[in-house]
Amino acid sequence: MARAPVIKPRKIASQERARATVDALVEATARILVKEGFDKASTNRIAEVAGVSVGSLYQYFPSKEALVAAVIERHQQEIMRTVQAELTDVLTQPVDKAVRKLVAVAVTAHRVDPKLHRVLAEQIPRVGKLAKLETFNRENYSLFRTYLERHRDELRVNDLELASFVCVTSIEALTHNAVLHYHNVFSGEAMDALIDEGTRLVTGYLMG
Amino acid sequence: MARAPVIKPRKIASQERARATVDALVEATARILVKEGFDKASTNRIAEVAGVSVGSLYQYFPSKEALVAAVIERHQQEIMRTVQAELTDVLTQPVDKAVRKLVAVAVTAHRVDPKLHRVLAEQIPRVGKLAKLETFNRENYSLFRTYLERHRDELRVNDLELASFVCVTSIEALTHNAVLHYHNVFSGEAMDALIDEGTRLVTGYLMG
DNA sequence: CCAGAATACGAGCGATCATTCGCTTTTGGT
DNA sequence: ACCAAAAGCGAATGATCGCTCGTATTCTGG
C-alpha cells in the first residue's frame, strides 16, 4: 500500500552540495552552447562537462529544455543587474537625453556575454514558447511606452502604440546587429558613432 | 582495377520523372518546416511526405542540409520574382519616394510565404554558413548604399556606410517584426500606417 | 523491341540521444 | 556514533535519425 514515499518527486532540491551541482550544470550548459553549439549540448555531454552524472542532472532538471531555460533566466538576470541602475531616472529626462540613454543601455545589454546572447536568440524559438527573451522585450517595450505617454506633449506622434513599436524595434535591431554580427566593425569609437546615429534616428522620428 | 565507373556520383540528375521527384522533395521539406517545424523534418519523414523513398532522396540531395538549402534558394527566388519589378526605377527617384518604395517592397518581400520565411530566418544559422538570406541582405544593402551615393547631395549624413547600416537594419527589423510576429496587429490599414512611419523614420534620419 | 542507363525502392546499419532505475556514497540531525 | 534522507552514480533501454546498398522498376536511344 505505501507507495508514494519512495518515488523520487523530481526537481526539488537543496542541501549545500546540491546547489553546487545545479550551478555546475547550468554553467556547463552555457559553456557548451557558446563553444560547441546547441546541437552538441546533449544531456550526457552537459553532465560530463559539469563533472556530474546524468542521473544527477535528472534529479534537478526534468528535461533538457529546463536546463536551457535556466541558462536563459540566468542570462536575463545578469542583464537586468547590469542595466537596471541606468534606467531609474530615464522617465524624468528630456527626450533627447532619454533616447540616448536608452540606446546606450541597449548596447550595454547586448554586451553582457554577447556570444551566449546570440546563441540564445537564435535557439530560443526552438525551446518551447517559454521565450523569456520575449518577456524581457515586453518589459522594455512597456517602459518605453510609459515614457512616451508622460512626454506626450513634447512629441509629434499620434499613435503612441505604433511609435513604441517603431522605436523599440529599431533600437533593438540596431544594437543587436551591431554587437552580435558586426562587433569587429563597431568597436570603440565606431560604437559611439552608432549610438549617435541611433539617437538621431529615434529623436528625429519622435520630434520634428 | 576498373573502380570508379560503378560508384554513384551523387547529386546529378535529370530525366523528366526525376525532376518531379526533386520538386516533390523540396516541396515536402518546405511543408514540413512550416507545419511541423525543423526538428520533425527528418529525411525519412520528408521522403514519406514527398511520396518517395529515402533512397531516392539521397540520389539528388547529398544531405539533409542540401534539402534545406534548396528550400531557401527556392524561397529567395520567389521573393526576387515578386519584388524585382518594383526596384528598377528606385535609383532615379527622389529620397522620399524612394524610401517609401523600399519600405513597401520590404513588406511585400516578407509577405511571400511568411511562415516559411520565419522558420528559415530562425533556423538558417544552424544550417552551415550557407546563409543565403545573408546573401540576400547583402544585395539589399548594396542597393541602398548605391542609392545613397547617387543622392549624396540631397542628404544630411556624412558616413554613407553607417547610414546604410542604420536604414537597412531598421527597415528590415520593422517589416520582419510586423509581418512575422505581429501580423494580427498589422493588417490592412495598420500596415499602411506602418509604412508611413517607417518612411518617416528613415527620411527624417537621412534628411533634416 | 531490347539492352543498358537512369530512377526508385526500403530494410537495415551504426550512431546518438534523452531518460530511467537500482545501487552506492555523503550528509546532518540526534 | 548512527541512520534515514539526500545526493550522486552510470550502465542500460528504447527511440530516432542520417544515410547506404543491393535490388527492382522504368525509361530511352538505337
Image (cartoon, coloured by chain):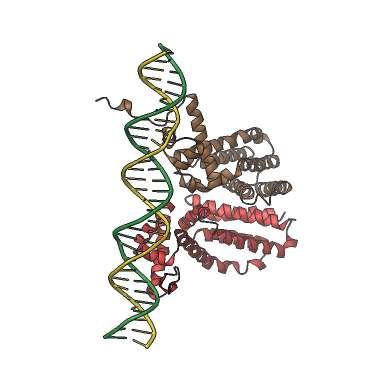
Chain colours: A red, B brown, C yellow, D green
In this rendering, position of residue A86 left or right of residue B95: left
Q: Is residue A152 above or below residue A181?
A: below
The x, y position of residue C20, in whole percent, is: 40, 62
Q: Residue furthest left?
A: B1
Total numbered labels placed on residues in the image: 0
**Rendered residue at 58%/48% (across/down):** B169
The x, y position of residue A59, in whole percent, is: 41, 67
Q: Is residue A47 visible?
A: yes
The x, y position of residue B203, in whole percent, is: 68, 46
**Rendered residue at 44%/53% (across/down):** A38
In front here: A200 or A90?
A90
The x, y position of residue B126, in whole percent, is: 46, 47
In this rendering, position of residue B158 left or right of residue D15: right
**Rendered residue at 67%/64% (across/down):** A147
> Where is residue A138, by image quadrant?
bottom right
Q: Is residue A187 visible?
A: no
Q: Is residue A28 above or below residue B200?
A: below
Q: Which residue lies furthest to the front in this view?
A: A1
In front here: B175 or D28?
D28
- Where does the N terminus of chain B fall, quadrant-wise? top left
> Where is residue D8, by image quadrant?
bottom left
**Rendered residue at 32%/25% (across/down):** B5
In front here: A15 or B32?
B32
